[in-house]
Amino acid sequence: MHLEGKVCVITGAARGIGYEIAKVFAENGALMALVDLSFDDDFNFPYGEFRQYEADISDHDKVKELIKAITVDFKRIDCLINNAGITKDSLIMRMKEKDFDSVIAVNLKGVFNMCKHAMRPLTKSDDPSIINISSVVGLMGNPGQCNYSASKAGVIGLTRSLAKEMAGKNVRVNAVAPGYIKTPMTDKLSQNQQEAISQTIPLKRLGNPDDVANVCLFLASTAAGYVTGQVLAVDGGMTMY
Ligand code: NAD
């Protein structure tokens, strides 16, 4: 499952799951275009060849410029991983309109922006693929996350439609639906909440970012050459029937 010489673009790469995916991909030979809103001054990525790009994926025109810059720097794109995402949780009666809109703008429209502008370079690759990071709450729902779960369910619809649209050009499009993964996003939960959640998970633990990264590695590799339009849950069994 190596990615030798493949140019992979990943959003939300400055930390959390995105950083881990970038690390695992680089360790397996990929050349990484790391995209995030911003990178800390002490950002360190000692795993292989990479470039950093600061961009807001919810901004359609900026994403067009971003993809242009990446294709100038790397000459092509083989894989796009749409990982960047935000939460603005509250019960719907208290949810502010701007908190609904901003979550949809980043988590769903951001994926549209990236897919749309990266599609032309992707179609020139020998083995093009897109991996969209959704969430189990896009499958199951979750109280306090109407905005987030709608955005993540939207990502699944987009993934399946795009997979059908692009299959004729051999572009594989899949989604990964993580359960609870230990990152700065879930650090917002108290220790008690994390322990209570662990008890509800069949494998009795929160996931680690590399649990997600290894599944993405498979989906980006030629080992998954006959896999498209799928949603792979990486959730310790949370969504099994
Ligand atoms: P995180 O908050 O640790 O990291 C997200 C990264 O995305 C940050 O570096 C942030 O700066 C970047 N980002 C946010 N808005 C952006 C924008 N407009 N443009 C560019 N970059 C932007 O989150 P994480 O836990 O690593 O989650 C990564 C992805 O996995 C997200 O899509 C999230 O919804 C999804 N997910 C996470 C979990 C979990 O338990 N952590 C579970 C299911 C799904």
Image (tube, helix red, strand yellow):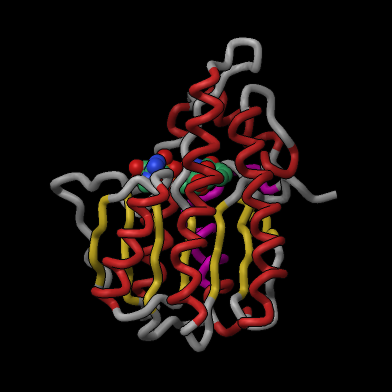
The quadrant in which residue 169 appears is bottom right
Q: Is residue 68 found inside the magenta-colored segment of the image? A: no
> Residue 233 at x, y = what percent?
67, 55
How many numbered discs?
A: 0
Q: Kindly identify the residue that appears in the image at 43 percent across and 76 percent down.
A: 121
Relative side of 64 to 216, left or right:
left
Relative side of 214 to 43, left or right:
right
In the displayed structure, 182 sits above or below 22; it is above
Magenta: predominant secondary structure element? Answer: helix
Near-viewer residue (40 or 106): 106
> Residue 109 at x, y = what percent?
52, 46
Q: Kindly identify the residue that appears in the image at 26 percent across and 74 percent down.
A: 72
> Residue 154 at x, y = what percent?
66, 46
Q: Residue furthest top?
A: 94
Q: Kindly identify the residue that appears in the image at 73 percent across and 44 percent down.
A: 139
In the displayed structure, 59 sits above or below 162; it is above
The answer to whether residue 223 is seen in the rendering is: yes
Q: Residue furthest bottom?
A: 126
Near-viewer residue (24 or 152): 152
Which residues are the magenta region?
203-217
Q: Residue furthest front?
A: 61
Near-viewer residue (10 or 23): 10
Q: Quadrant of ligand 1?
A: top left
The quadrant in which residue 67 appears is bottom left
The answer to whether residue 183 is seen in the rendering is: no
> Residue 230 at x, y = what percent?
71, 64
Q: Residue furthest left?
A: 41
Q: Kindly identify the residue that appears in the image at 60 percent across and 83 percent down.
A: 223
